[in-house]
């Protein structure tokens, strides 16, 4: 799972801009006859301007992606600023719609489509004033966001430390803005239920309790850059203690007082969206936004029940395999109470996660042609988040200056059995979130808007699908780890039933908890925390299984179409090269790839790779595919005439493949009949307009 609070900060905007395709992204057939250079410049100027505006508007987001130019500021959540944000979205949308789409390349048309779609989705949330005010969630939210931000800020230089101190000085004002928003929601009868707010209070108390030097707000001052002189470090630490004591903690206490004295007494009995004014419309939007489909809650609910039935039968088969004498509930109790199934402490748990990651890493080339360069690590999440918090992933900076992190709940070592750990690493680290997100972020030739974030249904769908790849990576070798994997899959299937049950079908919180415990065997306390998460973050939990099922459907389609020619590495490359896109766009990309793979272009790419590997002495799969096109050559030279030669003046169907080898670009021209030529740059002639590009 990726972090929630930042998504809440830029609600709707992360989906705005954010597909993250790779350099070799597949493009739809039927490219334009010629690219309009003016329209292309206008589009990318709009992308760049929008990115800059978003970084300034949401400086916290900028920090997380590695842009520290506004590291002394916090988001302005005043009514005037929020109104200005929606006005800016309307203006940008009008500008985007004015760009002549027909003059753009296929890739840029896709970028524009996603850009427009996201802006439209953002603007649809404008009437949801009460819903947007509910920024305090069961898993985190505004109440924990500042501490999480400070964990990400750089403090290598004195200037960076001054930025941190400036943010601390700004925090009281930011809390006052949030209190005004919460009170506005309260006046509109939009308040989270008691169980959610009790978790919010516990999270606040976890930040207020420690002594200043152990406070999460003092954390940046424990890792000051070694180039800062010792005396200056001491002075910064003294100022940091004073800022925590006099600015941050008093502001957080004001937030706590509001929650305890005003918000909690007004908490409704049910947090189902259907019980709020206009809540049904809000939930319809959240379902559509989080799944990028037009499926109804009833359809999604039915899918959850179907998948639960399938997975339960597989879990029962494991119980029979180990010859356990007892029913499903007894087996789960056995797994959750035997000491041999647990680590002996927090450090042992963390070491176990790291060992699993080290075992996965060397196996990844079996399934992936390209791996990210930026590293990842495993660390304990902050203690104030509590022992019931689910594990999550923090992505790297766009410039690679910060690694990705799998944040493990070390406090929960007594309730995290060994048999669930492999599937967790596969989801949060590799081949899950880190592999997908880091690969996307490293595509520096594309606009930052297309690398900076993503769609939940793609990100979480990929991570859940990645768990199933563990069988090919040497995981789940013992039946207990296999049971843990199946339990995790069943848990995501149960979310489809529970989320829709609560918000669209009148389920109570207790019914949801009982259902999940019965169908999955998960710990009741953990399930309760998760159900409160679904109550306070409607629709998000639908993304996991819906996204995974689409990827599996597309893989099965490719296997059926290609038969013996199906290559899992190529399929994964196509899926990952699209970046984080809505499911309909992912499906279109895979279908386009299948069309070109069936037409002969795929065979030409392989022939070009083989020839380039022979010439350069490197492995064929290590050669970067820049582009592959079905083209029409103007004569028999295949776009590579030799001096003094005469060629047939005829239209010749063929292909053009560009690879990047160790010594630079390699440009291959081919005919549909099989001729293949490596064409030097000084002789290369472009094909006729109208290429279909991979």
Image: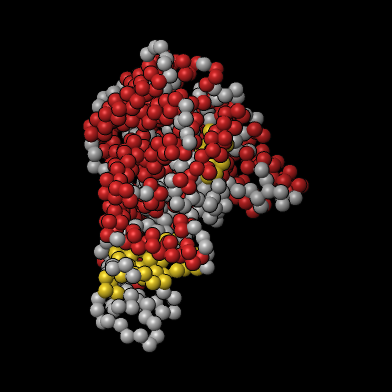
Say whether residue 113 is visible.
Answer: no
Q: At x 43% / y 28%, what residue is drawn?
A: 482
Q: x and y percent of residue 9 in the render?
A: 43, 43
Q: x and y percent of residue 472 in the render?
A: 43, 39
How many dots with numbers? 0
Q: x and y percent of residue 271 in the render?
A: 34, 27
Q: Tell whether 235 sits left or right of 426.
A: right
Q: From what the image shows, is residue 73 above or below residue 605?
A: above
545 vs 501, nearest the viewer: 545
525 vs 587, nearest the viewer: 587
Q: In which quarter of the view is residue 102 placed? A: bottom left
Q: x and y percent of residue 342 in the render?
A: 54, 22
Q: Which residue is outermost to the top?
A: 325
Q: How is the image coloured?
A: secondary structure
Q: Quadrant of the N terminus?
A: top left
Q: At x 46% / y 15%, what residue is drawn?
A: 334
Q: From what the image shows, is residue 611 above or below residue 17?
A: below
Q: At x 32% / y 41%, what residue is drawn?
A: 552
Q: Which residue is outermost to the right?
A: 231
Q: In which quarter of the view is residue 234 placed? A: top right
Say whether residue 632 is visible.
Answer: yes
Q: Tell whether 139 sits left or right of 567.
A: right
176 vs 616, nearest the viewer: 616
Q: At x 72% / y 46%, what residue is drawn?
A: 233
Q: Which residue is outermost to the bottom?
A: 644
Q: Quadrant of the C terminus?
A: bottom left
């Amino acid at each position: 799972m990726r972090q929630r609070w930042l998504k809440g900060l830029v609600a709707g905007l992360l989906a705005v801009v954010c597909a993250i395709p790779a350099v070799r992204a597949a493009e739809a057939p039927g490219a334009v006859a010629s690219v309009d250079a003016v329209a292309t410049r206008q589009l990318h100027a709009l992308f760049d301007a929008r990115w800059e505006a978003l970084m300034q508007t949401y400086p916290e987001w900028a920090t997380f992606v590695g842009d520290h130019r506004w590291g002394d500021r916090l988001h302005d959540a005043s009514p005037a600023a929020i109104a200005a944000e929606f006005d800016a979205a309307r203006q940008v949308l009008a500008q985007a719609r004015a760009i002549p789409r027909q003059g753009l390349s296929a890739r840029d048309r896709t970028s524009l489509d996603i850009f427009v779609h996201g802006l439209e989705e953002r603007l649809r949330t404008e009437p949801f004033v009460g819903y947007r005010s509910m920024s305090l969630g069961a898993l985190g939210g505004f109440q924990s966001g500042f501490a999480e931000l400070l964990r990400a800020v750089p403090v290598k230089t004195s200037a960076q430390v001054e930025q941190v101190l400036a943010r601390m000085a700004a925090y009281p004002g930011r809390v006052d803005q949030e209190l005004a928003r919460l009170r506005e929601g309260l006046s509109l009868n939009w308040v989270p239920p008691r169980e959610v707010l009790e978790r919010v209070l516990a999270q606040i108390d976890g930040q207020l309790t420690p002594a200043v030097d152990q406070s999460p707000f003092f954390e940046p001052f424990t890792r000051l850059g070694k180039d800062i002189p010792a005396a200056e470090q001491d002075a910064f630490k003294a100022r940091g203690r004073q800022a925590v004591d006099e600015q941050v903690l008093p502001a957080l206490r004001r937030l706590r007082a509001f929650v305890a004295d005003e918000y909690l007494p007004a908490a409704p009995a049910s947090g189902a969206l259907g019980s709020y004014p206009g809540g049904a419309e809000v939930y319809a939007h959240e379902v559509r936004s989080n799944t990028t489909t037009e499926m109804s809650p009833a359809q999604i609910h039915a899918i959850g029940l179907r998948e639960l039935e399938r997975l339960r039968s597989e879990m029962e088969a494991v119980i029979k395999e180990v010859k356990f004498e007892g029913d499903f509930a007894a087996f789960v109790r056995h797994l959750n109470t035997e000491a041999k199934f647990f680590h002996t402490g927090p450090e042992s748990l963390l070491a176990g996660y790291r060992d699993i990651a080290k075992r996965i890493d060397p196996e990844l080339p079996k399934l992936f042609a390209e791996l990210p360069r930026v590293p990842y690590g495993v660390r304990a999440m902050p203690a104030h988040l509590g022992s019931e918090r689910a594990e999550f992933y923090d992505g790297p900076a766009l410039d690679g200056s910060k690694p990705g992190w799998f944040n493990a709940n070390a406090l929960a070592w007594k309730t995290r059995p060994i048999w669930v750990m492999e599937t967790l690493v596969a989801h949060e680290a590799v081949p899950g979130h880190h592999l997908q997100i880091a690969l996307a972020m490293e595509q520096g030739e594309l606009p930052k808007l297309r690398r900076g974030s993503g769609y939940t249904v793609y990100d979480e769908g990929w991570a859940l699908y990645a768990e199933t790849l563990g069988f090919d990576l040497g995981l789940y070798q013992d039946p207990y780890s296999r049971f843990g994997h199946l339990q995790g899959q069943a848990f995501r299937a149960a979310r489809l039933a529970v989320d829709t049950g609560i918000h669209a079908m009148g389920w109570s919180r207790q019914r949801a908890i009982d259902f999940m415990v019965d169908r999955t065997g998960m710990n009741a306390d953990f399930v309760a925390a998760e159900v409160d998460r679904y109550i306070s973050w409607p629709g998000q939990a639908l993304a996991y299984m819906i996204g995974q099922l689409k990827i599996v459907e597309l893989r099965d389609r490719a296997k059926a179409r290609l038969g013996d020619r199906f290559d899992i590495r190529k399929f994964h490359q196509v899926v990952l090269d699209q970046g984080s896109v809505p499911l309909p766009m992912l499906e279109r990309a895979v279908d386009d790839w299948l069309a070109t793979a069936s037409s002969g272009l795929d065979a030409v790419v392989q022939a070009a790779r083989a020839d380039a590997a022979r010439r350069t002495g490197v492995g064929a799969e290590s050669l970067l595919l820049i582009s592959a096109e079905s083209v029409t050559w103007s004569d028999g030279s295949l776009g590579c005439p030799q001096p003094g030669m005469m060629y047939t003046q005829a239209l010749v169907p063929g292909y053009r493949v560009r690879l990047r080898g160790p010594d630079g670009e390699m440009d291959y021209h081919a005919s549909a009949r099989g001729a293949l030529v490596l064409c030097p740059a000084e002789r290369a002639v472009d094909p006729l307009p109208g290429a279909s590009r991979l």
